[in-house]
Image: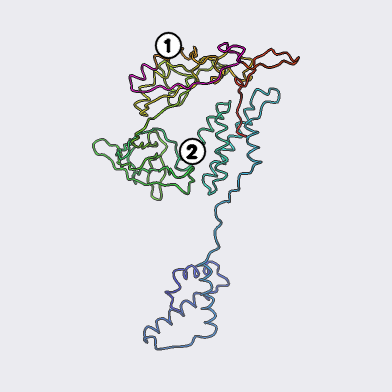
Amino acid sequence: VPTIYLGLNIFNALILERNEQKEKETRLFDAFKSLLVAEETAIETGFSHFKTAEPELNKDIDLLIDEIRRVSNPAESPGPEKILSFREESRGKYLRLLDTRVPSDETEFDHEKNLAAIRALERLARRYKKGDNLQPFREIVRLLVAACGHDIHEVRDRANVTLERLMAPKEFDAPLAAQFINLKLFESHRFEFDIPPVKYGYFLRLYRNRLSHDFVLEKELDYIDLDLQADKKTGLFTTQQLFDEPGHYDYLVYKKKKEGACWLSQKGCSGRINVIPDLSGEIILEIFPDIHGHTRVYWDDRTGHPGLVYNENGEVIRLGRFSDITAHLKDLKQRYSITAIYLLGVQKRGNNSEDWAPEATSPSPFSPVSLCEIEPTLGGEEGLRELVEKAHALDIKIIVDMIPHINRKSRAVSDDCIVRCYDDGGNLVERASTDGRYGSWNDG
C-alpha cells in the first residue's frame, strides 16, 4: 500500500499512538517505517524487487490501516437541537398568561405574569428563527400579534420589537434598522459612515427581503457584502450600490477581524432601504383620525399635534384630530408619495356610555348617530374642510368612509323605522342594538 494513498490521517494515527504511550509501544510507527522502506526499495529497483514481509509486520501494517480508517471517520457530530412543533396546549398557556388578571380585580392585568409570558415568547422566537420549522414560527407570530394590542405598554412594545426581529431579513439578534431610505427602482445609493479606521477595515452587508417567502429563517438569509473604502477627502467610509429589484433591504456595517467579523451596534450603522417601483396607480393611506400621530413616526412631533393623549390614569383625554393629519400632509406626500387618504370614523358619534365595554373610554367610531354630521371632537366640519383644502393643494385626494347604519340612540331615524326590544317585564321600551358594544380582543 503506497503511503501516499493513506493521506495525512496517517500522522493523526501516529500522534494518537504516541500520546497514549501504551507500554512504550511503537507498532504503528514501526509499520509506517517498514512501508517507507518497502517504497524506497521498489523505487530503486523499478518495482521489480519484491520481498515478503514478516507475518508480524503484516499484522502491524493491517493495524495501521485500520487505525487510519478509524481516525478518518470520526463519530458523527450531533446536529442542531431539534425544535419541537408548537402544540395547542402551549398556545393556550401563553394566551392565558398574557390575559392573566390580578385576583382581587379582574379589570387589572397581572403585570409580572404578562411580562413573563412575553419574555418567554421572545426566547421562543429567537430559537424558532434559528431553526428550520415554520409551523412553530407562525404560531409565535400569531401570539405576538395578539400581544401587540395588550393594555400594558411594556408588553405590547416588546411584542412589536420581537415581531420586527422575526420579520427582518437578518439574524434575530442583529441591530434593528435605525434609519430608513426610500429609493426608486434602478436608483443608485451612496452609503457613508462616520466610523474610526481599524486594522482590518469594514464591509457593508445588504440583506435582501425575499418577497416569495412569508417569513425568513436564519438559514435562508440572502445577502451580499460590499467593502467599505475610506474617502480621503471626507474621512468617511463609503460604498455605492445600484438597486434593480423592488423590495426592502436591511443593511449593517461589519468590522473585519483577524478571523471573521462582527456587526457594529453604534448609531447610523444599521438601516433599511425601501426600493419602490414606479407605480402607475394611486397610493392610498388609510387613517384613523383618533389615533393619527400616536405612532413612532410622529412620536417626537413637538408642533402641537401629538395625537392621542392619556392622563395619569390611562384615560384618553385628547383624541387625534383632523388638524394632526393636516400638519403632516406635506411630510406624507414627500416621504411616501401619498396620492389619496382614506379617512375612517369621521361621522358624529353617540354618548350612550351604558353600551360601552367597561374598559372603553370613548364611543365607537363605527356606531355613529348621524349619516352626515362630522364628529366634533375630531374638529368638526371646519377641521375637515381645512384638511381637504390643504390636501387638494398638494394634489392629495380625500376619501371618507361612510358607516351605513346608526347608533340605537340616534334620533335621525324615527321610531317607526327602528327595531325595539323588550325589558325583563315584557314591555317594549328600548331601541334594540347590535352595535356600540366592543371590548378587548383575544386571538384565541
At 44% across and 12% down in the image, what residue appears? Answer: 381
Is 182 placed left or right of 428 in the picture?
left
At label 2, counting other C-alpha atoms closer than 10 Å, the crowd grade (few under 14, some 14-19, many 20 or more) is many
Residue type for callout 2: Arg
The scheme the figure's colours follow is rainbow
Is residue 65 or residue 100 the one in the foreground? 100
> Which residue is disc 2 drawn over?
165
**Splitting the image into 4 quarters, where does residue 285 fall?**
top left
Tell me the element at label 1: helix
Is 59 placed left or right of 427 in the picture?
left
- Give me the C-alpha separation between circle 2 and circle 1: 43 Å
Is residue 371 or residue 224 the one in the foreground? 371
> Which residue is disc 1 drawn over?
382
**Splitting the image into 4 quarters, where does residue 227 fall?**
top left
Residue type for callout 1: Glu
**Vertical arrangement, residue 90 with respect to residue 56, above or below:** above
Is residue 45 or residue 77 the one in the foreground? 77
Residue 303, given in percent of the width and then of the height, sits at 40, 16
Residue 38, given in percent of the width and then of the height, sits at 43, 82
Task: Note whether residue 383 is visible.
Answer: yes
At 63% across and 39% down in the image, what residue appears? Answer: 91
Is 75 placed left or right of 93 in the picture?
left
